[in-house]
Image (cartoon, rainbow, N blue to C red):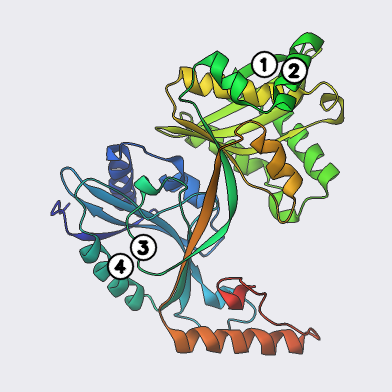
């Protein structure tokens, strides 16, 4: 493989040799966030999509930009677009990631040439919260909302006392009630986690997109064994609150979780969150990313903020339009298709790409 530090590489996860190169570069990355692992990206690809990584590799530098290539012909309103596609990052906090003395201009020149060859219309990416992980983005950047991040720089006692009073009280209440905590790196309680998670989604009347199927979780456990942590709060030997976290070099990412009705008055989840923070600190992690809110639910954001009153960070996204004519033509085709179905459709304000809104 060419190791010229300015060389642009496009690696396809479906090609064994290129997948091995992707994994080798990922392991070289000092922070090796799980969102840049090919298995993680594949979990969010649909049938017919390509999972790729736009890269640059040198002896002491690298760029990783994992993406899903989505053929527009797969959409009912995309007929006649057999060669066109768009690009999107996987769910989570994505790239483009970079480290060392990378060559950003050379990377983007190569990236744009590749995007042109595959007839890419647009690009949408969700950025990492940690700006030092990212290379400059050649496109538009927008703030989408706030996320809560817990710093693990304090000692255990100081960490507890940094929480809001309500959170500290809830931790103590759960301890006195007899709630216990179990950290699970093997997924041995996967079935119990799924039951807790689904019951929570039912109670919250969550959107279908949040009902990840069982094989999704099974593949996480099987193929990312060192990157997944299940944290469980138990009462009377039953899991009453559970959380799935992603483990990266410097950070823990709260990914999915829930609490059954019985666990709510026990304050099981606050105790679980505190225990995760202590575990992360013991593993020399720098932060626990709690994430933001679903839609306009500020209550969830305020709840998370009790564990990091000064931990608000902006969540940003990036977008690019490679072919403006094709982009606006797709909006028109989507509108015409919707009219044919008896629907009045206009692109939702702020949604990108607009033709998928």
For residue 70, side relative to residue 275 (left or right)? left
Q: Quadrant of residue 161?
A: top right
**Residue for point 76% across, 23% down:** 268
SS for tag 1? strand
Label 1 to label 4: alpha-carbon separation: 46 Å
Q: Earlier in the sequence, mark 2 or mark 4?
A: 4
| CB-based contact (under 8 Å), mark 1 and mark 2 | yes
SS for tag 4? helix
Above or below for 116 versus 173: below
Q: Position of residue 131 (x, y in %)?
A: 39, 49
Label 1 to label 2: alpha-carbon separation: 6 Å
Q: Indicate which label's residue lies in the foreground, 3 or 4.
A: 3
In the picture, the disc for residue 181 is 1
Mark 2 surroundings within 10 Å by alpha-carbon count, few (fewer than 14), some (14 through 19), many (20 or more): some
**Residue for point 37% across, 55% down:** 96
| CB-based contact (under 8 Å), mark 3 and mark 2 | no
Q: Which residue is mark 2?
A: 234
Does any portion of residue 137 appear in the rendered image? yes
In the picture, the disc for residue 111 is 4
SS for tag 3? loop
Q: Position of residue 283 (x, y in %)?
A: 45, 20
For residue 111, side relative to residue 322 (left or right)? left
Q: Earlier in the sequence, mark 1 or mark 3?
A: 3
Q: Position of residue 46 (x, y in %)?
A: 56, 60
Does any portion of residue 184 appear in the rendered image? no
**71 or 131: nearer the eye?**
131
Q: Quadrant of the C terminus?
A: bottom right
């Amino acid at each position: 493989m060419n190791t010229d530090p300015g060389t642009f590489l496009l690696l396809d996860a479906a090609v064994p040799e290129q997948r091995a190169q992707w994994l080798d570069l990922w392991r070289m990355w000092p922070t090796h966030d799980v969102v840049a692992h090919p298995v993680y990206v594949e979990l969010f690809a649909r049938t017919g999509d390509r999972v790729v990584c736009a890269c640059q590799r040198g002896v002491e530098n690298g760029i990783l930009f994992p993406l899903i290539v989505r053929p527009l012909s797969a959409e009912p309103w995309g007929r006649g677009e057999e060669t066109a596609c768009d690009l999107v990052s996987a769910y989570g906090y994505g790239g483009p990631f970079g480290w060392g003395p990378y060559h950003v201009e050379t990377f983007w020149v190569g990236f744009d040439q590749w995007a042109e060859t595959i007839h890419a219309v647009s690009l949408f990416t969700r950025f990492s919260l940690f700006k030092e992980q990212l290379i400059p983005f050649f496109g538009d950047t927008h703030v989408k909302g706030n996320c809560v991040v817990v710093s693990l720089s304090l000692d255990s006692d100081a960490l507890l006392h940094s929480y809001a009073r309500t959170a500290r009280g809830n931790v103590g209440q759960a301890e006195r009630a007899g709630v216990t905590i179990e950290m699970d790196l093997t997924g041995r309680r996967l079935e119990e986690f799924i039951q807790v998670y689904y019951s929570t989604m039912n109670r919250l009347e969550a959107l279908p997109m949040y009902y990840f199927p069982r094989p999704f979780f099974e593949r996480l456990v099987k193929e990312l064994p060192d990157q997944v942590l299940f944290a469980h709060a138990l009462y009377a030997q039953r899991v009453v609150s559970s959380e799935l976290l992603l483990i990266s070099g410097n950070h823990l990412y709260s990914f999915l979780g829930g609490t059954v009705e019985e666990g709510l008055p026990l304050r099981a989840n606050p105790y679980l969150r505190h225990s995760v923070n202590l575990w992360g600190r013991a593993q020399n992690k720098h932060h626990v990313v709690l994430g933001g809110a679903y839609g306009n639910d500020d209550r969830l954001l305020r709840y998370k903020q009790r564990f990091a009153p000064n931990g608000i960070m902006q969540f940003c996204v990036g977008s690019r339009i490679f072919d403006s004519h094709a982009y606006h033509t797709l909006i028109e085709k989507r509108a015409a298709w919707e009219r044919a179905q008896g629907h009045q459709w206009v692109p939702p304000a702020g949604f990108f790409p607009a033709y998928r809104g």
